[in-house]
Amino acid sequence: MEQPIRFGIMGCAAIARKLSRAIKLSSNATIVAVGSRSPDKADGFIKDNGLPENTKVHASYESLLDDPDVDAVYVPLPTSLHLQWAVAAAVKGKHILLEKPAALCVADLDQILDACEANNVQFMDGTVWMHHPRAAKMHDLIQDPHLFGQLKMVNSIASFHAKPEFLHDNIRVRPNLDGLGALGDLGWYCIRFILWTADYELPRTAVAFPNPVKNEAGVLLSCGASLHWENGTVATFHCSFLAHRTFQATAVGSKGTLTLSDFVNPLEEKSAGFIFASQSGFKELITGWKPLPSNHVIPTEIPQEACMISEFSRLVGDIRDGGAKPEKKWASISRKNQVVMDAVRDSIDKGFKPVQIVG
Ligand SMILES: *[C@@H]1O[C@H](CO)[C@@H](O)[C@H](O)[C@H]1NC(C)=O
Ligand SMILES: *[C@@H]1O[C@H](CO)[C@@H](O)[C@H](O)[C@H]1NC(C)=O
């Protein structure tokens, strides 16, 4: 790579602080500009996050997108603004790292992805956990027919117990900003885990669980669903702003079981674990299992956010410096995630009836 990928950050959202640190830790990326409608906020953001003093401040997102020194933008804006600003970024030829959930619905996401394709820009959403080296290691195991067999059941839970102020005031529960609530913020991760275990084969049907909890504005605070493939493989997930912090995921194959309790955010930064069992049985007569499940610990030199930045920057570098085409895999995975999320929301709206999932 001739020079690092030059990032512009759109807005100064809290999540942008974490990504700014990740960009600083990634050797092939650098932050050159921040766009904010409040330049004071942007100045504060630059100081608080130890960004270089020559980081440019743009007083509007338009001006950030017009900056010829910006290769790529990180878009942590509320979901309802993704369509407008991701399309605008693509039209200006900026590669896009878009926070999740990618869009309010698949029709919006398609407009974003079409704009990316038409302008030859790389798209990736901010589902960070997939970029931890742990994910690659787990993937090897569950794809192994001898160790894992065929996928039969998946369950995933993503929750945290939000403070009362959060439940009616936070961006993530305001109908005009992040109208998908817990489904968009947390359910997105659960659905991604499920799709990842099924090698992105879309389930056929989604059925939402009855009685989801909503706030006074009608935004989902807690919900769940089951997802069904035609061959009988089934997945369930629960996402909630009302339950203790839990990021549990289990995939059960015919011959093996993968389980981890911190799939979205590892318990620690420098390594992450999971448990894998294969061909488990009971000991004879005495209580016990054999073989015992194995505990895997996967170290990482840089935090998972920086792994994501490095991968994104590698792809952008190949396009910018090597004339490569954008990697379509990331758009395709994002779209499937969105299609399943839309089906779950439809099922909730239709009184928990089964909804066909159409890719
Ligand atoms: C990007 O950075 C990573 C380490 O952070 C390094 O391994 C990789 O070679 C770099 N890629 C390019 C294209 O410079
Ligand atoms: C059923 O379909 C899922 C999703 O495509 C696949 O992962 C799994 O291996 C299939 N199971 C069997 C028994 O064929």
Image (cartoon, helix red, strand yellow):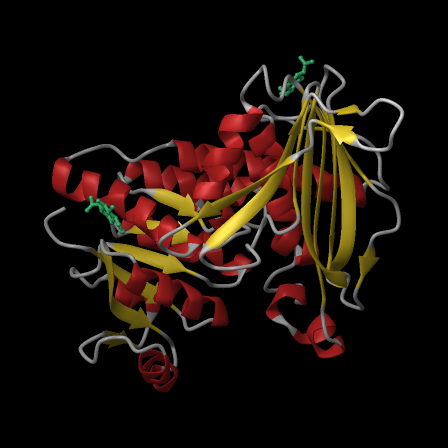
Q: Residue at x 62, y 56 (%)?
A: 185
Camera-nearest residue between 266 and 117: 266
Q: Position of residue 95 (x, y in %)?
A: 30, 49
Q: Is residue 123 left or right of residue 230?
A: left
| Residue 87 shows in the view | no
Residue 219 image-quadrant placement: bottom right
Camera-nearest residue between 39 and 27: 27
Q: Position of residue 263 (x, y in %)?
A: 59, 48
Q: Position of residue 121 (x, y in %)?
A: 29, 42
Above or below: residue 280 compared with residue 54: above
| Residue 105 shows in the view | yes
Q: Residue at x 49, y 43 (%)?
A: 109
Above or below: residue 108 compared with residue 169: above
Residue 142 image-quadrant placement: top right
Q: Residue at x 68, y 19 (%)?
A: 255
Q: Given the current orientation, which residue lies at the most extreme left position?
A: 2
Quarter holding the C terminus is: top right
Q: Is residue 129 left or right of residue 251?
A: left
Above or below: residue 61 compared with residue 148: below
Rendering quadrant holding ligand 2: top right
Q: Residue at x 47, y 59 (%)?
A: 269
Q: Position of residue 105 (x, y in %)?
A: 59, 45
**Labels in figure, total:** 0
Q: Is residue 1 left or right of residue 8?
A: left
Residue 27 image-quadrant placement: bottom left
